[in-house]
Structures are given as C-alpha cells and as structure tokens.
Image: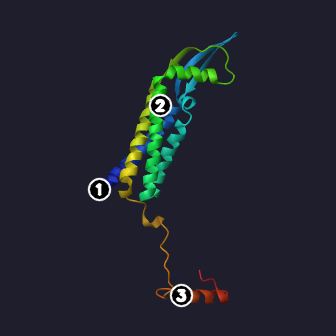
Amino acid sequence: MNASRREYLLTLALLAAGGLLGLAASSRPWGSARQPSSLSTTVTTVSGSDLLPYAPAVSLVAVAAVVAVPAVRRIGRQIVGAVLAVLGVTLVVSALLAVLDLADRIETWMGDSPGTAGPVTDVTTSPAWGIAVLVAGVMVLTAGVLTAVRGPGWPGMGAKYERPARRDTADGEGGASSRDTWDALDRGDDPT
C-alpha cells in the first residue's frame, strides 16, 4: 500500500473516530444539579448536547464526510476539508470554553430551562465528557486540514462509479450521425 493511500485511509479513520467520539461524548451527562422546592428536591442531569446543542450535529457531519470525501475529487475535497476544519475549530473552542466554566454553565442552563423553580444547588460536574468532545473536535479539525491540503492527491472512487464519457459521433465514426438519429426518429424508431 503506497503512502498516499495509507494517509487517505488514516484520515478517513480519524474522521470517523472523531465523529463517533463526539456523538458519544455529547450524549453523556456532563453534570447535574439539585433544585429544592417546597415539597421535594429535583435532581436534573445535564448532557453535553444540552450545553452544546450543535456538538451532535457537527459529529454527524464528520461521520457523513467519511462517505463524502471518497465521492468527490480535487476541489470538492478541498471544500469538504475546509468545512470540516471550520467545524472542528468550532467544536474545540466551544468545548474548551464549556469545560473551563462547566459549573456555571450547568447552573445557567438549569435556571433558563422551562418548568424549573427554585435556586440551583449542589452542582456536580463531569468534565471528562467535555474533554472527550474537545478531543473529537481536534480529530475532526486534523482530518479536515489533511483533506483540504492533501486530499486532491488521494485516490478517488473507481471508474465504474462515474458516468461514461459522452461521445459525439457527428462525424460518423463509430456510431450513427446526427442525421441518422433524426431519420430514425422520423421513422418512429427509438434511437436510444
């Protein structure tokens, strides 16, 4: 296996791993808090997708790009790579900011949620899942940069997936001329 193909496959694997890690980590609980009321105390768990609602979407785009990268060529790969790089940076920055201020973000989310009443107490955090989303963002960013920069040189899908080149046979070589086609139509024949 040549170096270009190995790099291509490793980038696709990195992209898939980043997308799947982002999906898994954003669905996990990043923390919880208690809200006492006059009759009881409610414990609410806050997931990563509650705090970063676009994290699962970015992760799904990364997983979908595993199919998109082989399907496009040159400029298409540069565009897909650039989009992935921007999404990866967005995920990294937002996850980093969320992890650095996780307790306050959970408290704010709880206070802004409809149907919640009373002060928020006993906020507990699980920053490991936020760090996992940050790592997933780095993986998507790296795969995006590699796709944008090195992707145009990678192998594409086989020729059996492409439309056959259309041959213009107006000169009569190898097929019917335009006049023959029109004559067939005039007779009621289907020239296709």
Mark 2 element type: helix
For the N terminus, the image quarter is bottom left
- Depth check, mark 1 against mark 3: the one in front is 3
Q: Is residue 116 left or right of residue 32?
A: right
Name the residue beneath numbered marker 1: 2
Residues at badges 1 and 2 in contact (C-beta under 8 Å)? no
Q: Is residue 87 visible to the viewer in this orientation of the structure?
A: yes
Q: Nearer the viewer, residue 148 or 165?
A: 148
Mark 1 to mark 3: distance in Å? 45 Å
Mark 2 and mark 3: Cα distance apart in space = 63 Å
Mark sitting on residue 177 = 3
* Distance from Cα at disc 1 to Cα at disc 2: 36 Å
Q: Is residue 56 left or right of residue 148?
A: right
Residue beneath label 2, please? 95
Residue type for callout 1: Asn
Q: Amino acid at mark 2?
A: Ala
Place of residue 97 in the rendered image (x, y in percent of width and height, measured from the top left): 47, 28
Q: Helix or strand or loop: what does disc 1 sit on?
A: loop
